[in-house]
Amino acid sequence: MARQRKHPLVFWVSALPPSLWLFGFFLAPLAIVWVLSFGEKRGLIDVEITWTLANYVRALDPLYLGVVAKSLWISGVTTVLCLMIGLPVALGIVFAPGRWKPILLFLVILPFWTNLLIRTYALIAVLRTRGYVNFTLEWGADTLGLPFEPLALLYNNAAVVIGLVYVHLPFMVLPLYAALDRMDKLLIEAALDLGASQLRAFVTIVVPLAVPGIISGVILVFIPALGSYLIPDLLGGTDSQMIANVIERQFKRANDWPFGAALSFLLMYLTFGALAIRSVLAKGDGGLEAK
Amino acid sequence: MTGDLGSENRTPADKAIIRINSLSKNFGAIQAVDGVSLEIQAGEFFALLGPSGCGKTTLLRMLAGLETPSAGSIVIDGEDMSRVPANRRPVNTVFQSYAVFPHLSVLDNVGYGLKVTGIRAAEVRDRAEAALDLVKLEGYGARMPDQLSGGQRQRVALARALVKRPKVLLLDEPLSALDAKLREAMRHELVNLQETVGITFIIVTHDQEEALSMADRIAVMDRGCVRQVAPPAQLYEFPTNRFVADFIGSVNLLEGIVSAVDGAEMTVQAALLAAPLRIVQDKRFVPGTKVWVAIRPEKINMTKLETGPTLRLDDNNQVEGIVEEITYLGDFSIYHVRIADRPEGLVKVAVPNFDRATLRPFIWEDRVILRWNPNSGVVLDS
């Protein structure tokens, strides 16, 4: 009896502080921005909430839809590349000798110990015209006696994708590793024993069993990549601006908070849409969530 | 179990399907398999028996192609398979933990091995269903593995391996994960199944009862080496070394020296006993050889020592002792009889519990006489 009476108290004591935190610092600001998206600019700093949909109509202008499409495209390419690089890396760690595993996992998360801004500037040093990649290529061309023209690796879409893949790769590798490490290695031996080639065993056994990890990894890469601001800002050229850069401009240089808020929420609705599609897919696959 | 024990073998054809020649495997400094040579006949139910860590599973994995031999060769059906990868060997395996693919239905699991070798979907389906019938899982095709019991998952693993019609089926401790009742039923089923399909079965087990009851021949392994290969009854009645005698069943080992050989009869002077032992057996040793006499507990006759000097001490194969410990096992009891005042002076005697009475025929501190026939003991020199 005493336990039953105690339980609600335990619940409230432990749930209240984080709830207040989430409400005060997440839901409330979000609600303010949401309300702002229905406002109109008055003068230099004033905003009047008129519940107008004009900001959203303006956000659907082909100019901005183009930026959204470009953001989706860049995030998509980033996600696919992360998956293609992350899967072999995760497999390599899973099958590495036991004492190597912690070291390799440590190497995967090591970049997090450095500030994103510093890592991005480091990438500039690698990719710029007089950067390490071009130095290496020039040295190679000189050795072979070939003419050399420095490659334009920075300030374009490719640079943005390279930067995004670099930053988001750990978010792909870790869930993939978790899913693959859980897998019974004997299943691969069983597939080989039954006559499957290595590739066939990989496609028919390893990949399907890694699906929960692949889904988690795709979400963890795609959603932050879609809203990324710093990397396209520093590594991108004039035509590789993503939606977050446009939003930033509205809030700062353009000083149009209502329109920036509308664009933010447009991005949010897209994210929710992606999550909804994912949960529908998961249900169709026989409840991968249950794993 | 009638007739000559040596030919009590269900394989009529003398055709080796597997020839293993001085096969070795070491993992770093650990010698898992050490120079094993074996011939396994087509259609045989063969068992690799030994304690855990004796190398039997490594040997099986080398046959499957999941482990590369360090030295030696494996010839399967006339072809050297030592370096052939697992997916190109005419051999299939039932794994200890079954390794049923969790994301595939029962039918897709069973059909997997056919599908990956490019067989038409319709044929895959027909053959997979036939294999499910064979292991008595008809109608289970659409289920997912997590809807099956352990025993049913094992049947799926069995059907999945058999559907490929391998020349040899390898079974790694197939019954160890089942409960006692199911295990016994599965033993009979595996034997029947092997007779139905006519495929050579090689089973790895640490359970001697399992090996004795199922296999045509058994190879007893110890520390990477094969210690004896023989049909079950021969293994039990005529072990060729102390390890086998001790590992299969229960045994009393008396150390001694051969003192005389007279025709079929050998006389051994045991260190613990005053009177010499007489043993009749085919294999003879020269006098002076250091040997061990192995006597099974159930082959010793025990009677109460009546008051008075009934024991003639010059009688061979007869010894006086005192009951020190009794282990009741239901169908019979094991009596530990002290025959000499030394740590190794305890002899195990198995006595069937004929009477239903809870009263024991012998009790602690009873003085008893143990007797056995000259052909009950086996003399071993290693």
Image: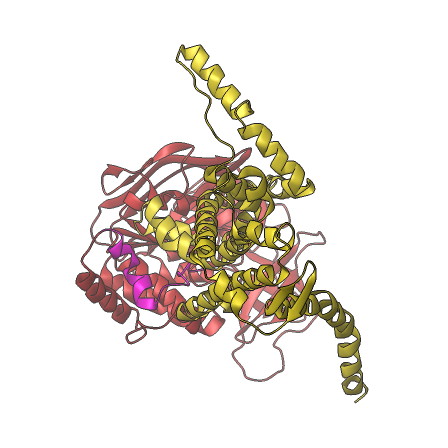
Q: Residue at x 45, y 59 (%)?
A: A61
The hue in which chain A appears in the rendered picture of the protein: yellow
Q: Is residue B37 at all visible to an observer of this figure? A: yes
Residue in front for this viewpoint, B204 or A3: A3
Per the image, is B99 magenta?
yes
Residue A130 percent across, percent down from the top left: 55, 22
Residue B203 percent across, percent down from the top left: 38, 55
Residue B199 percent across, percent down from the top left: 25, 56
Q: What kind of colouring is applied to the model shown?
A: by chain
The hue in which chain B appears in the rendered picture of the protein: red
Q: Residue at x 76, y 71 (%)?
A: A20
Residue in front for this viewpoint, A239 or B206: A239
Q: Name the outermost residue toward the front.
A: A43
Please state if A167 lies on the left or on the right of A7 as rendered: left
Q: Is residue A26 above or below residue B231?
A: below
Per the image, is B93 magenta?
no
Residue in front for this viewpoint, A173 or A187: A173
Magenta part of the chain: B95-117
Q: Residue at x 45, y 44 (%)?
A: A81
In the rendered image, which quarter is residue B147 located in? bottom left
Q: Residue at x 55, y 38 (%)?
A: A235
Q: Is residue A64 above or below residue B82?
A: below
